[in-house]
Structures are given as C-alpha cells and as structure tokens.
C-alpha cells in the first residue's frame, strides 16, 4: 500500500490499461490522504474543533456539575434526553469531539512528518542554487564595482558569514554565484510547535487513562485514606485499578478561614498530617493555591464548612456526645448551611430512629422566628432544626444522601416530624418522648480533593515546547540571499546581482536595503585597500 | 490620600480619559475630513500599487499617506495623536489609582480587566502610529470603538474596588491576567485592522480611486491593513498562548486540575483555535485576503463574547466578575 508515501510527489500518471482494483483503491486512499493532510483541511478541522467546543460551554456538562445537568433534565424533560443521545452533556468526552481532534491530529502528523524529514535533510544540505533570474525575487538589486569577480565574491561571502549565513559558492555557465541561507531555526520552530501539540495530546490522554481523583469532606480531627470506598465522589481513568492507589492517609487538624473587613474570604488553611496507613504522619499546612504535592499525588483544599455538634440524651439518661455531620454551605458569603444528622441506632427497633434536619448559621440572626446567617465567621452559631422520628430507610437498599433525609419515607409517613426549634450553643430541644437534643458546638470541615495525574508534568513540558516552538516560528525569519557576478569586459570590473527571499514577519525591504548598503561599503573598502593609488572605486546601485 | 480618595480619583480619571479620547476622535475625524488630496495622478499610483508593496517603519510609500498630507491635515493628525497619548496617560492613571486604592494589581474584576484591555489596545495603536505615521489615518477607527467600549464599561461593568477572594491571591494573577490583557488588547487592534481591510478591499476591488471624497479612500491601502492585522495577530498569539498556559498552571494549584472545560477555559481554547486558523489561513491559497480577515474578525468576536457572555451569563469557576 502506498498510503504512507509523503504527500509531495506528483500523482502517478494513469496507466492506459484498466488499473487493477488494488491500484484503484490505493490511488483513492492516496488522494484522500493528500486531501486530509492539506493545509486547507487543517483550517476546516480547526474550525470544526472550535465549533464542536461551543455546546460544551453553553449546555451544562456532567464533568462540571452533575446537579446542573439534572436540573436541565427537570426543566426540559423532552429536549434533554435527545440532547443526551448526542452526548451534548459530555461534549468533551464524546465520540464526535474525539473524531474532530483525532482527524486534526492525523492531518497534522501527515503534514508535519514529511516536512520534518525534508527539513532534516535540508539542514545538512547546502543552500539551493540561485534561481535563474534574481530580479524575479521579492528583493533584488544590482551593484557595480571595479573589483574583479573573485574579490567581489570573497568580500560578499565574508560579509554574509559575519551575518551568520551559511554560504556556498558555485560556478554555473561561466558565472560565479553564491547561495546563502540563515534562519533554518524558524522551520525547526514550526516543527517543534506542531509535534509538541501531538505530545500534548498524548500526555493528556495518558493522564486521563492512568489518573484518578477523589473528593471527601473531612471534619477537624478526622482522617481518611486514599481508597475509592472512602471518597464521597471519585472518578478514575480506564486503566486504574483500585489496588493501584497510592497507600496514603491524610488527617485534618485545624482548619482556619480568614476574612477581610468586608467579609471577602482572604485565605483558607488546613493543618494536615499525611503518611502511609499506620504511620504517625508528617504535619504540613495546605491552603487555596497551595496544595500538598507528593510525587505524582496532590491534595487540595477545595472548600470548607461547618459541622454542628449535638449531644443527644435519651429519656433513660443514655447520652451520645458531640455527634455531628457536615452541613453543606448554601451561601458562600454568609456560610449559611444545610444538612442532616441521622441517628439510626438509638433505640431498639427500626422505628425508633432519630434524625435532625436543619439549617446552620455561623452568626445567626432570628427575625420573626426565621433564622438567617449574617456573617461567615462563627461568631454566634445557631441552628434551626426539625427533629424526625421513625424509619430512616437506610437499609432499604436505595442509596441516599448523607446530607439530607429520604423524602419518600417522610411522604409515606414512616418518618414524622416530632419537634422543631432554633438553638444557640448550649440550648436544648426536648422531644415529646423526653429525648433532649442540645447544640453542643461546632467543628469546621474541609472539602479535600486527592488527585493523581501522571500525565501532568508531561503536559507542562509539552506546553513549554509548544510555546518555544511558536516563538521560534513566529519571531525568527528565514532568509536566502543569492549573488551572481558577471565580469565587465570593458574595465575588468564586475557587476553583481543580489536577490533575497525572506519568510517571516516584518518587512524585508529595509533589511535588504541595509544589506546592500553594507555590501556596497565593504566592496568600496576592499577597493581602496587594493588600489591605494587612489583610483576612485566605481560603485553604485541601480535597483531593478 | 485615603483609599476612598484614590478610588474617587480613579473614577474622575476614567471620565477624563473618555473625554480626551472623544476629543481625539474629533481631531482624527478632522484629519480625515480635511485630507482631500487634490493630486489624483499621485494618488492613483497609491491605489494601483502592487499588493505587497513594502512599507518600512517610516518608509514613505504611496499607501501610507502621511508626510505628504497638507499642513492642516498634519496638524490635526498631531493634535489627535497628542490627545490620544494624554488620554492613554490618564487611562493608565485610572488603573494606578485603583490599584493603590485597593492595594493590589488593578485587574481583579471585569471592570478593571476590561479597562486595562482597552488601554493596551490604545497603546498598541500609538506604538503602530509612531512607527508608521501612515497608520495615523486609522486613528478614528481605533479610538471610536475605544470610546464606545469605555462608556459601556463605565455604565455596565463598573464596580467599586474590593479585596480579592482567596483563590485570586496568587502571583499567577499577575502572570495570567496581565498576559491575557496584553493578548486581548493586541487582538483588539488586529481585529479592527481586519474589519477595515474588509471595507477597504471591497472599495479597491470596485476600482475606487484615492481621490474619491469618501472616507474609505483615505484609510491605508488594503495591503497595509492586511499586514497590520497579521503582524499584530502574530504578536498577540504567543502572548495569548502563554496566558492560557499560565491559566492552566494556576488552575492546577487553585482548583485542583489544570484544565476542566470550565466555560471560560472553553472559550479561551476556542479563541486560540480560531487565531491558529487565522494564521494558517493567511498562508493558504484560497484563504488569503478576505476569508482570512473574516477569521480574524471572528476571533475578536470570540474574545469579546468570552469577556461578556461567559462572565455575566454563564456560571463557572471564573465568575469573579463582580457584576450581578
Ligand atoms: C492542532 C492543530 C494546529 C494548530 C494549533 C496549528 C497552529 C499553527 C500556527 C499558530 C502556525 C503559525 C502560522 C504562522 O507562521 O503565521 C502554524 C503554521 C503552520 N502550520 Fe499549523 N497548526 C495546526 C495543524 C496543522 C496541520 C494539520 C497542518 C498541515 C496540514 C499544519 C501546517 C502548518 C504549516 C505548513 C505552517 C507553516 C506556515 C508558514 O510557515 O507560513 N498545521 N500552525
């Protein structure tokens, strides 16, 4: 098959006889391959990529917020399933998005690899011979001098070498010529840039396949270990096995949130300890913008909140001290939070279970019996709670959130409200059966995220290569200069034609003028040293 | 001065720079209006000049009419440039006073960010106009959008100075946001050059001659505009690339992942891809000229959309805009 041939060669002339089926398919594939690796296709594919990303920003995405997607399903019950069939809630992991970028990258490799080979060859080869008519080049000029041709070429060659051109001298049809080239790094930059993009994609893919991430809320004084069972939510790449997880445990000591006068949160810091399971653990402090980094793994603080603590005393005097559960913040400005505390094991039967559902205000204000929070700092913590007794449905087989009660049990009447009230720290609510619930205080919790992404450093390295290649490609310029001399039979002088071809940013004309001015000056200087008798060197330019 | 006085000063300077820029627009208008050049023979050379006529930094070629303008026109041009520079200085003062008032870099919310982007655009224009005086004829077309943008920013995006939330307190704010502002400001000028290119190239294609009294006859030639658009985009693209990379590095430490297709990230990516397409289009047969210019205009549209829509309408981790 010929599909791996570089796209440059001319299409083979069609043989007169009917080509074999194999040849025809080969020819077809070759044509398609050339079409795919044409720059025009690259532009179209770049556009497609841009277009394909748009729905990912306009529609809610599962990767960003599962709950926004559920909300969208609730709001658009007929439209949403249709959109979902087209992966519009998972755009960036959808097959069609992958198809666009994979085609783009195949096109890129097909375009850039042959160029890279050609460039490698060109780097070793001499600059190409001068074109027949130098005046056809974008910049050209003619200079005349009284010097003989050999001297002229020596002088020009030296001038060009000083300017870091690679120079070769050739003899053609009796005329001597110079070909000079510099700035091959521009092309190198282009290749580095495009190939680094491929590297970036591979590193991203590797990170996705072998990476994982877990999130957990940890209350002060608690500890978690890196395993999928422990995390509240987790996601992992296709090649991750549960047993691959780094054996490490993290404990949360003190958590601090600091605020400016206007209550803007200024910093969150968590004192943690980390180490292998069973180890003592090393202490350290992490915070926003300042995660824990241990080779390949990172631990981040992604949020925080409060866990009110309660003391529950049963009528028989048994007391459960400082039971608590995180209440999730519903308003980051005031840290007003909502949550639930489930106590299934208080009594003997499954119908004596107790649950508290409520609202926590770090700084509470009660107006008309309604508790609101007015400050994110825990200056005057209060809760508004509703106590339920009955069956919680924890063993019903259906998973339920630990942050709210199972509404279906309440609807069915198996769990019913028995009391409600607002409590400050130390205050109690007494239930009809004599059980008392006391707000004993609060603890802070941190939302921690454990991430493992083995591709990350490679992504960074590739991104730096992308940038370096880009700078080389855009800022450097490649210039070729050709010089041809013809003797002037009348006076033994020489006429030299200079032509230049530049690729890159900026205008070439002023640079070319500067080059010819310098050449003229160098030739004049050479002429005076050669002819100290004072014969005026005959120089002069006649552009075009 | 107290923080309150500094904030007040910043707001006053904002109005002052809008005023100065408006006067500059008037002066640039006058420059164009009085610029009727009665030498059709010379001017025709300009209109018919080969498309890739080189124009050095101060080369005087027919498609950069400047030095041969009548004195009245030159004077208006100089007054306009002076007003623009004064405007840019007060405009810089807006940000400096704001920065001193809040004691941090003055680009922590959308108002400050957008104000800084417009400043970069003005500075980019001034640099171009100083290096190639012929480009002063673009003044009105750069400064008029600048005035409109600033008025809109003042009306719709204004917020009082405030401290930054915890996630923004990082030295990456300086790196990421500063480069994003630079890239955006440069793309702004590039986009305007492409819009004018589209207008001017249609005029040229219809055989419009430079002695015509129409405004479009007096802006630089299509070839010059195309070159300005391309050169600015080439300048802006690596800056934008760097801004995106710096954003990813920052996101890795602030949000726990370097890329998460947050709406802002998605649109930054889209803009990057569109500008890459523009740079390709400029060197691809069949795309050079008007199609490429359209791609550049789309690029600017994406940048503006990213600033306005994504900050104000969609919700994401980047919602620090401070505009409700
Ligand atoms: C991920 C997709 C791609 C991106 C982001 C990208 C980006 C770029 C950029 C920014 C330039 C600089 C343009 C300039 O010099 O002004 C460039 C140049 C170039 N690209 Fe790409 N490119 C991509 C894919 C491709 C593909 C698929 C091809 C081949 C079909 C290609 C071929 C080229 C060539 C030949 C140049 C050099 C143009 C010149 O030197 O004038 N690129 N690319």
Image (cartoon, rainbow, N blue to C red):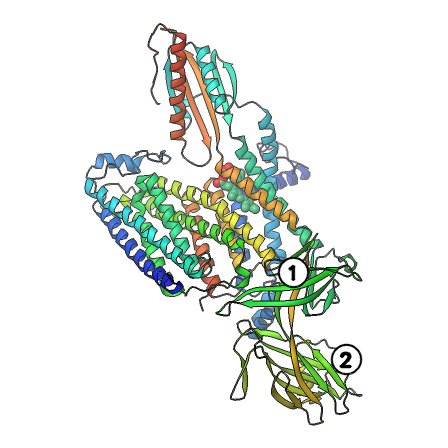
Asked if disc 2 is less than 8 Å from ligand 1, the answer is no
- The chain that hosts pointer 2 is A
Disc nearest the viewer among 1 and 2? 1
Q: Of the numbered discs in the image, which one, if any, rests on residue B25?
A: none
Q: Is residue B249 visible?
A: yes
| Quarter where residue B118 is shown | bottom left
User: Where is the N terminus of chain B found, in terms of image quarters?
Assistant: bottom left
| Residue at image mark 1 | A285
Residue placed at 33% from the left, 54% from the top?
B90
Q: Nearer the viewer, residue B2 or B188?
A: B2
- Looking at the image, is mark 1 or mark 2 earlier in the sequence? 1
Residue placed at 71% from the left, 66% from the top?
A231
Q: Is residue A496 above or below residue A195?
A: above
Q: Would you say the residues marked 1 and 2 are in contact, meaning their CB atoms lie under 8 Å apart?
A: no
Q: Position of residue A431 (x, y in %)?
A: 68, 92
Q: Position of residue A189 (x, y in %)?
A: 55, 37
- The chain that hosts pointer 1 is A
The local secondary structure at tag 2 comes to loop
Residue placed at 46% from the left, 61% from the top?
B109
Q: Alpha-carbon neighbours of circle 1 within 10 Å: few (<14), some, or many (≥20)?
A: some
| Residue at image mark 2 | A395
The local secondary structure at tag 1 comes to strand
């Amino acid at each position: 098959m010929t599909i791996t041939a570089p796209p440059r060669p001319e299409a083979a002339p069609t043989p007169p006889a009917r080509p074999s089926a194999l040849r025809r398919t080969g020819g077809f594939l070759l044509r398609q391959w050339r079409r795919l690796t044409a720059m025009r296709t690259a532009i179209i594919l770049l556009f497609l990529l841009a277009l394909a990303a748009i729905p990912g920003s306009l529609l809610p995405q599962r990767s960003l917020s599962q709950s926004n997607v559920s909300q969208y399903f609730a709001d658009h019950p007929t439209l949403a399933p249709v959109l979902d069939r087209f992966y519009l809630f998972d755009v960036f992991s959808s097959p069609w998005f992958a198809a666009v970028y994979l085609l783009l990258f195949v096109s890129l490799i097909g375009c850039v690899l042959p160029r890279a080979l050609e460039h490698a060859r060109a780097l070793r080869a001499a600059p190409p011979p001068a074109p027949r008519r130098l005046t056809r080049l974008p910049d050209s000029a003619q200079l005349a001098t009284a010097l003989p041709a050999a001297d002229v070429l020596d002088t020009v060659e030296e001038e060009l070498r000083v300017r870091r051109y690679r120079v070769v001298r050739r003899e053609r049809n009796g005329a001597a010529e110079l070909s000079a080239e510099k700035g091959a790094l521009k092309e190198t930059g282009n290749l580095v840039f495009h190939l680094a993009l491929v590297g970036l994609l591979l590193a991203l893919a590797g990170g996705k396949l072998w990476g994982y991430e877990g999130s957990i809320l940890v209350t002060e004084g608690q500890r978690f270990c890196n395993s999928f069972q422990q995390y509240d939510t987790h996601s992992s790449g296709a090649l991750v096995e549960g047993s691959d997880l780094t054996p490490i445990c993290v404990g949360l000591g003190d958590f601090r949130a600091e605020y400016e006068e206007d209550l803007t949160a200024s910093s969150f810091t968590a004192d943690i300890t980390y180490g292998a399971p069973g180890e003592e653990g090393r202490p350290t402090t992490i915070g926003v913008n300042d995660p824990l980094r241990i080779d390949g793994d990172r631990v981040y603080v992604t949020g925080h909140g409060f866990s009110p603590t309660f003391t529950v005393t049963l009528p028989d005097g048994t007391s459960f001290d400082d039971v608590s559960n995180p209440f999730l913040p519903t308003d980051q400005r005031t840290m007003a939070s909502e949550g639930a505390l489930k106590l299934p094991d208080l009594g003997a039967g499954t119908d004596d279970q107790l649950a508290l559902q409520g609202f926590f205000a770090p700084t509470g204000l009660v107006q008309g019996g309604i508790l609101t929070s007015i400050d994110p700092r825990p200056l005057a913590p209060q809760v508004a709670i509703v106590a339920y007794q009955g069956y919680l449905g924890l063993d019903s087989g259906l998973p339920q959130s630990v942050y709210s009660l199972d509404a279906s049990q309440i609807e069915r009447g198996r769990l019913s409200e028995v009391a409600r009230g607002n409590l400050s720290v130390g205050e109690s609510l007494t239930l009809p059966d004599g059980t008392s619930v006391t707000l004993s205080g609060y603890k802070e919790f941190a939302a921690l995220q454990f991430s493992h992404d083995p591709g990350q450093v490679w992504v960074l390295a590739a991104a730096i290569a992308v940038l370096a290649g880009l700078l080389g490609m855009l800022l450097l310029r490649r210039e070729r200069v050709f010089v041809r001399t013809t003797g002037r039979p009348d006076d033994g002088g020489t006429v030299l034609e200079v032509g230049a071809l530049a690729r890159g940013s900026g205008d070439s004309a002023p640079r070319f003028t500067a080059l010819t001015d310098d050449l003229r000056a160098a030739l004049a200087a050479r002429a005076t040293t050669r002819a100290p008798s004072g014969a005026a060197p005959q120089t002069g330019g006649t552009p075009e | 001065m107290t923080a309150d006085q500094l904030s007040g000063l910043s707001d006053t300077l904002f109005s002052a720079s809008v005023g100065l820029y408006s006067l500059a627009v008037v002066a640039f208008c006058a420059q164009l209006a009085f610029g009727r050049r009665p030498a059709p023979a010379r001017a025709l050379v300009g209109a018919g000049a080969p498309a890739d006529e080189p124009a050095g930094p101060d080369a005087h070629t027919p498609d950069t009419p400047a030095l041969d303008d009548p004195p009245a026109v030159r004077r208006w041009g100089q007054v306009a440039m002076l007003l623009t520079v004064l405007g840019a200085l007060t405009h810089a003062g807006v940000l400096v006073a704001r920065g001193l008032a809040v004691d941090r870099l003055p680009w922590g919310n959308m108002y400050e960010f957008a104000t800084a982007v417009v400043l970069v655009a003005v500075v980019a224009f001034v640099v171009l106009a100083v290096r190639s005086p012929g480009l002063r004829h673009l003044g009105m077309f750069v400064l008029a959008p600048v005035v409109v943008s600033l008025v809109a920013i003042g009306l719709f995006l204004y917020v009082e100075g405030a401290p930054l939330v915890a996630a923004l307190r990082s030295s990456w704010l300086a790196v990421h946001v500063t480069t994003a502002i630079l890239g955006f400001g440069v793309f702004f000028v590039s986009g305007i050059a492409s819009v004018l290119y589209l207008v001017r190239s249609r005029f040229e294609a219809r055989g419009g001659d430079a002695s015509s009294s129409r405004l479009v006859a007096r802006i630089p030639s299509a070839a010059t505009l195309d070159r300005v658009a391309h050169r600015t985009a080439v300048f802006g693209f690596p800056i934008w690339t760097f801004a995106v990379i710096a954003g990813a590095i920052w996101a890795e430490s602030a949000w726990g992942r370097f890329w998460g297709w947050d709406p802002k990230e998605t649109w930054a990516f889209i803009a990057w891809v569109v500008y890459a397409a523009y740079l390709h289009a400029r060197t691809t047969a069949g795309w050079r000229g008007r199609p490429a210019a359209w791609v550049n205009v789309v690029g600017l549209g994406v940048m503006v959309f990213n600033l306005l829509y994504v900050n104000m309408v969609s919700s994401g981790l980047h919602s620090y805009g401070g505009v409700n």
